[in-house]
Image (cartoon, grey):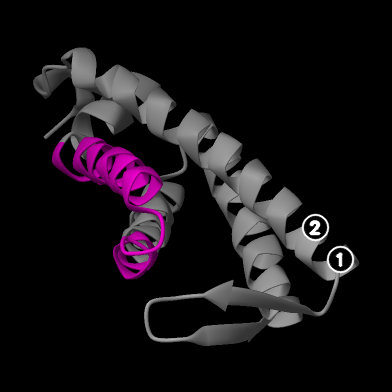
Amino acid sequence: MTNSDINTSGWAGWGVFAAVVLIVGGTIDAFHGLQALIGPDTAYFLGKVGLFSIDVQGWGWWHLIAGVLLILVGVFLLLGAKWARITAIVLVAINAIGQLSLISVQPWLSLALLAIDVVVIYALTVHGREIDARKA
């Protein structure tokens, strides 16, 4: 099947949307990670069960690394790398699972980010051939 055999729809443009979302989200993640690394070492959260303390350094490193990965994958997705599309799907799926774990703490933000994650995964998986054909 050649690229000319694939009809492209408006969804091919959503590949650009997915890349921009990854870059913006990665930048926000990286800033949160830096903020956690520069700030105090421990954060305290009051939950329904009790008081929780979290080592912010580990959380900060996770977000800094994830943010940099998201930025890189988003840039390469804009450049048309097929491996970036597959990597983006995996990273966004991990983010969606993380949002499910935070839904009781921040329900509206988690639901909004989960919806964006689903749209990005849908655009990159179902319309991946159209995205590749448009890049060619």
The one nearer the camera, 134 or 26, is 26
* Helix, strand or loop at mark 1: loop
Q: Tags 1 and 2 in contact by the CB under 8 Å rule? A: yes
* Amino acid bearing label 2: Gln
* Amino acid bearing label 1: Gly
**Residue 81 image point, x, y percent:** 47, 43
Task: Identify whether 59 is placed above or below 108.
Answer: below
Residue 102 lies in quadrant: bottom left
Task: Identify whether 107 is placed above or below 15.
Answer: below
Tag shown at residue 35: 2
Q: Seen in the image, is 46 located left or right of residue 91?
A: right
Whether residue 115 appears in magenta in the rendering, the answer is yes
Whether residue 121 appears in magenta in the rendering, the answer is yes
State whether residue 100 appears in this view: yes
Residue depicted at 33% across the width and 54% down the height: 89
Q: Seen in the image, is 23 located left or right of residue 115?
A: right
Tag shown at residue 39: 1
Residue lying farthest to the right in this orientation: 38
Tag shown at residue 78: none
Q: How crowded is the residue under tag 2: few (<14 C-alpha within 10 Å), some, or many (20+)?
A: some
Residue depicted at 42% across the width and 60% down the height: 91
Report, in whole angstroms, how far the alpha carbon at label 1 lies from the one at label 2: 6 Å
Residue depicted at 58% across the width and 35% down the height: 24
If the image is split into quadrants, where does the C terminus sit?
Answer: top left
**Residue 85 image point, x, y percent:** 38, 47
If the image is split into quadrants, where does the N terminus sit?
Answer: top left
Which segment did they paint magenta? 97-126
**Residue 54 image point, x, y percent:** 63, 83
